[in-house]
Amino acid sequence: MYKLVSIQEHIKWQEILDALDIQDIYYTTQYFLSALKLDPGEACLFYFQCADGEVAYPFIKRKVNEDAPHYFDIATPFGYGGPILNVQSDSAALVSKFREEFIRFCKKEHIIAEFIRFHPSKRNAESFKGYLQLLPLYDTYSLDLKKWQELSKLNDKVPAEAEMRKLGTVRHMFEFLVLYYSNARRREEADSYYFFTNDYFEALVSTLGPNLHLFGAYTGEKLISACYVMAMGKTIHFHLEGNLPEAKNQHADRELLAKVADWGLENYYEKFHLGGSLDSDLGDAKRAIANMPASTFFIGKYIHDQQLYDQFISLDDEDIIRRYRNI
C-alpha cells in the first residue's frame, strides 16, 4: 500500500517524517521548497507500507518533454536523500516489495528514469544494491561533537590568523555570495548547474529560517571564508561555502569548521556532517577535522523505459555524475 503526498500537504508530509523519526533537514518540505528553485517540478513524498515495514521517499518529479504525451524523471534535490526504511520484520522483503510497488507507480505516472543522491550518513544506498545502479563518488566526513569536546581539551589550539564569527543569514548573504561566485568562477571544471542564482539563496534563507546558519572568517573587516550550515534534530549539515584564495594560506576554511563545531557543541548538537568535496582544498580541511569513519556518497540510477530515456534524457554515467554529484 502506498500514498503520494504533495508538498502542499505539508502537515501530512511532516506526520510521516515524525512517525518514522526522520529528523533530517534534507527530508523536510522547507528544504524541498528551496530546492525547487534549482530543480523546478513537483515535490512529492512516496510513502509505502506493508507487513515488513515502511518506506519514505521524497523526490522532485520533472517534465522531460514539451509535447503530449508528457514524460517525467524524478530526482532527489541537491544535497542528500533517498528512501528511508523503517523495518518491522524483514528488510530484504521490505525493499523488494517497495521497489515492485514503486516501479508500478512510475509506469502509471510516465516516469522514465530516477536519480537518487543517497544519504551517506544514513548509508541507505546499501539497502538497494541489486535494485539500482549505484555510482560511488567520494568519501564524506563527520564530526562526533562529544569526541570533539574531548579532543579540544587535549589539544592546544593554534591561534587563528582570521577572526571567526557567526553571521546573520540575511544581513550577510550578499557578502557570502561574493565569495561563493568567486569560488565558482575559479572552479573551471564546475558544471553551470552549480552556479546557483541569488533567488536560490533567498529561498534558502526564507524557507529554512532558524534552521539555517552562516559563519564567516574575517581578516580585519574583510570576509575571506564563509559557509552556510543547516541544523535540525541532533545533526548539523555543511551546505555551501565560499573562499578567497588567501583563506587557504591562513587555514581559515579549517578554522571555520572548528568554529561551527564549537557552536554546535554549545547548542547541544551531537553530530556535524561535513560532507565531501570535489574541491581538494576543502576536502583536505574536512578530512583533517573529521573524527568518525568516512562514508561513501552514492548516486543511484534506474531507467524505467530505456527507449524513452534515450530519446528525451540520454545521459551517460559521466554526465549523471557531473549533474548529480553535489559540489
Image (cartoon, rainbow, N blue to C red):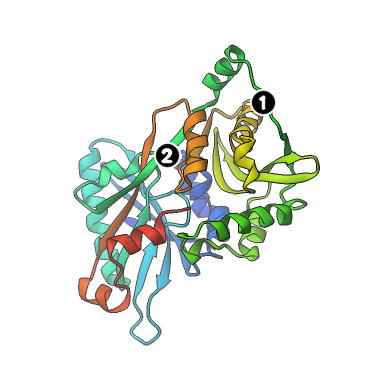
Specify whether residue 59 is in view.
yes
Which labelled disc corresponds to residue 216? none
Q: Quadrant of the N terminus?
A: bottom left
- Judged left or right of residue 35, residue 177 is right
* Residue at position x 36%, y 80% in the image: 70
In the image, residue 291 above or below residue 74: above
250 or 258: nearer the eye? 250
Q: Quadrant of residue 199?
A: bottom right
Horizontal side of residue 30 vs 88, given as left or right: right
Three-letter amino acid code at the position of disc 2: Thr
Does 14 sit above or below residue 302?
above
| Residue at image coords 29%, 58% | 301
Q: Position of residue 52 (x, y in %)?
A: 26, 41
Q: Which amino acid type is shown beneath numbered disc 1?
A: Glu
Report the residue marked by disc 1.
266
| Residue closer to the observer: 249 or 326 | 249
Determine the residue located farthest toward the bottom in the rendered image: 67
Residue that label 2 marks: 140
**Image-based side of 205 in relation to 308, left or right:** right
Q: From what the image shows, is residue 198 above or below residue 57?
A: below
On screen, 59 above or below 63? above
